[in-house]
Amino acid sequence: MLPASSGHYHETTKWPDDAARYRLGLTILQLSRGWQLRDPLQVRRDEIRASYEQVFLGGPAPCARSVVSLVPGVLHGPARGGPSTEAPLDFPPDFAAAYEALLSATVSIDLMLDRNHIPSTPPTGWTQSNQQFSDWLDHEPRDSQQKRKSVDALLLHDLQRELAEEARSSGITTT
């Protein structure tokens, strides 16, 4: 079993060789058997929130939720602000669950096996800034400890918004 990840979709769907892209996509779909890796940004947010709730609100110790899941639509969590795939409100619960599972599976299969590739675009945003940082750090005359401190500073900068948002959603106050 090889859980499918958002990275598999992102990279595979950009291959311009139709036959190779189809074979790889089919292999990923067959080997994953519906198992998916949860959105890493959502996993990170969930872990931050659970840690806050334990430390500041006396909640239970954070328990690790599985990163591998059969739950539909976990490749891209709510943290990304994508569209919801919830069933219509008038669906009975069993039908709603089936609807969400079938919709997720159908979209995943269609996306991976589409005849047309998704054209590559230059990296932007987070990817671009992290690549620039990595390129800069490669050429800096620093020892490993100094480079580690630079990486830690970048990580804290990267996390600052999520730390603040998850503190707020946890109900933590300054009083």
Image (cartoon, rainbow, N blue to C red):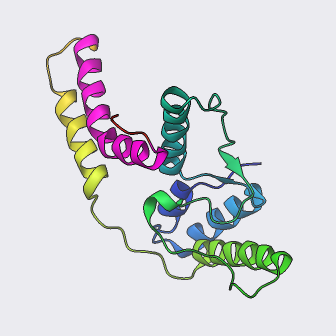
Identity of the residue drawn at 45% across and 72% down: 16
Is residue 116 placed above or below 97 in the rendered structure?
Answer: below
User: Could you say which is closer to the camera, residue 87 or residue 101?
Assistant: 87
Q: Quadrant of the C terminus?
A: top left
Identity of the residue drawn at 17% across and 33% down: 136
Which residue range is magenta in the image? 145-171
Residue 161 image offset from top left, x and y in percent: 31, 46
Q: Quadrant of residue 102?
A: bottom right
Residue 160 image offset from top left, x and y in percent: 30, 40
Residue 153 in the magenta stretch? The answer is: yes
Is residue 154 placed above or below 87 in the rendered structure?
Answer: above
Is residue 8 placed above or below 113 in the rendered structure?
Answer: above
Query: Left or right of 14: which side holds 50?
Result: right
Identity of the residue drawn at 75% across and 57% down: 70
Identity of the residue drawn at 22% across and 14% down: 146
Is residue 151 placed above or below 11 in the rendered structure?
Answer: above
Which residue reaches farthest front? 175
User: Could you say which is closer to the camera, residue 90 or residue 132?
Assistant: 90
Residue 147 in the magenta stretch? The answer is: yes
Query: Left or right of 75: which side holds 172?
Result: left
Q: Assign the magenta stretch its main secondary structure.
A: helix
